[in-house]
């Protein structure tokens, strides 16, 4: 397929372009800058907003992935100021003959919805970024319907900037924390390692609603809970590990020890070799990076704050409280999901690029610190939640899992085996 990617030189754009190139597609990269674009793309220079007939200018692509944007999800007036420009560009693409359009959305467009976010969840955003995204979604859907074009809205959640060995360390650590504490606000429906596409282990699929054909069943069906709404959330009391109970426990090839109280989750030891040191050793400098500065990913948010704290040589990083949960997908998996979604036409509409289970934000931060080997401790509760954000919000992976399953079924057995990062070792 000939695929146009606008905003291709952004953090997400570069990864999605690589994933598309690996699948053998021809990628036309539209951006103001070419430096940093993956080798193999066709670079189309120029300002997207000034192109009169973008469909012809960008060589009549089969599909456009619209990633163009500015200022991330920060409280910036540019989101509202640029909304008419984005809408005009999308309108020109569709009227010019573009057969399929996919736009990158965000969970921030939904607003303070507690519980599982689904394609039909009402959107009530509370800040400029979310308001602009919600308006663009409605306008694009209406125009695509009027032009009889294929419309896809890819809803992103939290993207964890880990790749390669760091990626597996992150998910191993997170799986260990979940298995040890068991304090997910809703009963397990998706094993942690399954979010990243890793094979699950028996201990991770134990319990009602976990694994098997019903792994992605809707929560009210599996859990006996009412459908979540803006005024309610299916929360459970967090289970603290009592002193002396389960001092160390072997789970999913990672050994974890939880210290009750403010140091909870600080001591995490992995047996995979990459993280076989206690955090106290990190604080003493035994994992010094010898002057190497971490690469800060430019999307802002939790992980950028952790990277920045490590770069400044700080010993703690301030985060939200332990009662905040979100949906996390790692960078490689996210790019794979996006590439798979836009290269098929059977599943359309709003598609959640989500893991499908709530993860405590501070636990994700601890797993990220472990994967990066940063000498940092998490100071939970230093910041309140952002205004207009839910305490527990996570996506519905039904559509993207269906897309990935169909994609895998079409591939040869040898090629499908390469999708399994554990099997190829």
Image (tube, rainbow, N blue to C red):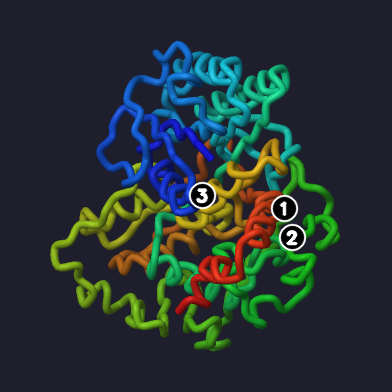
The residue that disc 3 covers is 158
Res 77 seen here: no
- Mark 3 or 2, which is nearer the eye? 2
Residue depicted at 77% across the width and 47% down the height: 228
Rounded to the nearest angstrom, the CA distance separating label 3 from label 2 is 19 Å
Q: Residues within 10 Å of mark 2 (few under 14, many from 20)?
A: many
* Residue in front for this viewpoint, 203 or 388: 203
Rounded to the nearest angstrom, the CA distance separating label 3 from label 1 is 18 Å
Task: Check the picture and name the quadrant holding the C terminus.
Answer: bottom left
Residue 313 numbered mark, or none: none
Residue 408 horizontal side relative to residue 271, left or right: right
User: SS at mark 1?
Assistant: helix
The residue that disc 2 covers is 216
Residue 415 horizontal side relative to residue 110, left or right: left
Q: Which numbered disc, 3 or 2, marks the residue that appears first in the sequence? A: 3
Q: Position of residue 385 (x, y in %)?
A: 52, 44
Q: Is residue 212 above or below residue 359?
A: below
Task: Check the picture and name the quadrant holding the N terminus.
Answer: top right
Tell me whether the residue at label 1 lies in contact with that at label 2, contact meaning CB atoms closer than 8 angstroms: yes
User: SS at mark 3?
Assistant: strand
Q: Residues within 10 Å of mark 3 (few under 14, many from 20)?
A: many
Q: Position of residue 221 (x, y in %)?
A: 85, 58
* Residue in front for this viewpoint, 142 or 309: 142
Residue 222 found in image quarter: bottom right
The residue that disc 1 covers is 398
Q: Which numbered disc, 3 or 1, marks the residue that appears first in the sequence? A: 3
């Amino acid at each position: 397929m000939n695929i146009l990617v606008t905003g291709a030189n952004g953090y997400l754009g570069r990864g999605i372009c690589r994933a598309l190139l690996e699948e053998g597609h021809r990628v036309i990269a539209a951006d103001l800058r070419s430096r940093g674009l993956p080798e193999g793309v066709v670079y189309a220079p120029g300002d997207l907003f000034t192109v009169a007939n973008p469909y012809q200018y960008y060589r009549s692509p089969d599909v456009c992935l619209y990633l163009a944007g500015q200022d991330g999800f920060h409280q910036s007036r540019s989101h509202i100021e640029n909304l008419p420009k984005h809408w005009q560009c999308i309108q020109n693409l569709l009227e010019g003959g573009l057969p399929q359009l996919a736009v990158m959305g965000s969970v921030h467009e939904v607003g303070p919805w507690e519980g599982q976010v689904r394609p039909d969840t009402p959107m009530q955003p509370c800040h400029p970024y979310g308001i602009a995204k919600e308006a663009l979604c409605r306008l694009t859907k209406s125009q695509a319907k009027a032009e009889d074009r294929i419309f896809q809205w890819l809803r992103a959640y939290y993207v964890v900037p880990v790749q390669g060995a760091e990626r597996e360390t992150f998910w191993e650590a997170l799986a260990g924390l979940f298995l040890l504490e068991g304090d997910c606000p809703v009963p397990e429906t998706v094993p942690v390692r399954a979010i990243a596409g890793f094979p699950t282990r028996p201990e991770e699929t134990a319990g009602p609603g976990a694994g098997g054909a019903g792994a992605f069943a809707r929560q009210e069906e599996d859990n006996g809970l009412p459908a979540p709404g803006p005024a309610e959330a299916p929360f459970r009391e967090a289970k603290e590990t009592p002193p002396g109970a389960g001092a160390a426990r072997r789970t999913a090839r990672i050994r974890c020890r939880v210290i009750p109280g403010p140091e909870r989750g600080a001591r995490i030891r992995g047996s995979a070799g990459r993280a076989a040191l206690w955090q106290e050793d990190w604080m003493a400098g035994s994992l010094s990076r010898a002057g190497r500065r971490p690469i800060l990913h430019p999307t802002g948010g939790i992980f950028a704050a952790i990277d920045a704290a490590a770069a400044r040589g700080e010993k703690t990083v301030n985060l939200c409280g332990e009662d905040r949960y979100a949906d996390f997908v790692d960078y490689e998996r996210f790019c794979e999901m996006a590439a798979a979604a836009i290269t098929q036409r059977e599943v359309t509409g709003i598609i959640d690029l989500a893991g499908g289970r709530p993860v405590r934000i501070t636990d994700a931060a601890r797993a990220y610190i472990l994967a990066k080997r940063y000498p940092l401790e998490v100071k939970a509760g230093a910041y309140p939640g952002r205004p207009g954000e839910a305490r527990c919000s996570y996506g519905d992976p039904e559509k993207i899992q269906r897309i990935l399953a169909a994609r895998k079924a079409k591939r040869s057995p040898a090629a499908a085996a390469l999708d399994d990062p554990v099997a190829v070792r």
